[in-house]
Image (spheres, rainbow, N blue to C red):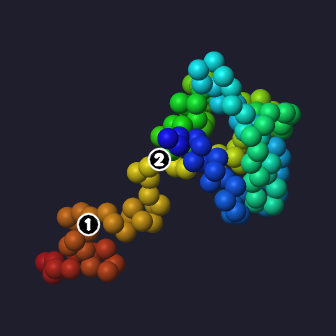
Amino acid sequence: MTTPAAKLIGRLESGRHPDLPETTSGTVRLDLREDGRTEHWHLTIADQQVRVDQRGGDADLVLRADRAVFDRIASGALHPAAALGRNDLTVHGDIRLFMMLRRLFPGPPDARHPREAANSAPATAGEADSGPAGRATGSQR
């Protein structure tokens, strides 16, 4: 069975990532702990591309957490900053790179773009009676 973290890591190398600024570059090591073992993933980021290797080694930024925490982050159920604040995720190194890396993680599963949410919101009773300028359309005496 493929975990959400494994799917995210596989998706990272799938081409250009326009959410990353073109100036973002560096190396990141993800340390996923499970059952007394640590699995290492090494990401190299440059020119909005991400190269993924399964190895340890030095990196500009090291993220460490249990696999279950990474799975929740990878599925969008847990925001990376919230995991960091709870000490479920530890970060060592270039925090600016962490701020950029967050752009690669998905948002909550039920999240929608604000425009999409506004367009699909039902009209309230006051809005239904309003004319184009937001005034009541009936005559007033």
**Relative vertical location of residue 41 with respect to residue 14 in this rendering, above or below:** above
Residue identified by numbered label 1:
123
At a point 69% along the width and 31% down the height, the residue shown is: 39
140 vs 72, nearest the viewer: 72
Residue identified by numbered label 2:
108
Dot 2 surroundings within 10 Å: few (below 14), some, or many (20 or more)? Answer: some
Kind of residue sitting beneath label 2: Pro
Dot 1 surroundings within 10 Å: few (below 14), some, or many (20 or more)? Answer: few
**Relative vertical location of residue 11 with respect to residue 76 in this rendering, above or below:** below
Left or right, 39 with respect to 7, comes to: right
Q: Residue furthest right?
A: 58
At a point 71% along the width and 48% down the height, the residue shown is: 100
* Cα distance between the residues tagged 2 and 1: 25 Å
Quadrant for residue 122, please give it. Answer: bottom left
Image location of residue 126, percent across then percent down: 22, 65
Quadrant for residue 23, please give it. Answer: bottom right
Q: Residue furthest left?
A: 141
Kind of residue sitting beneath label 1: Ala
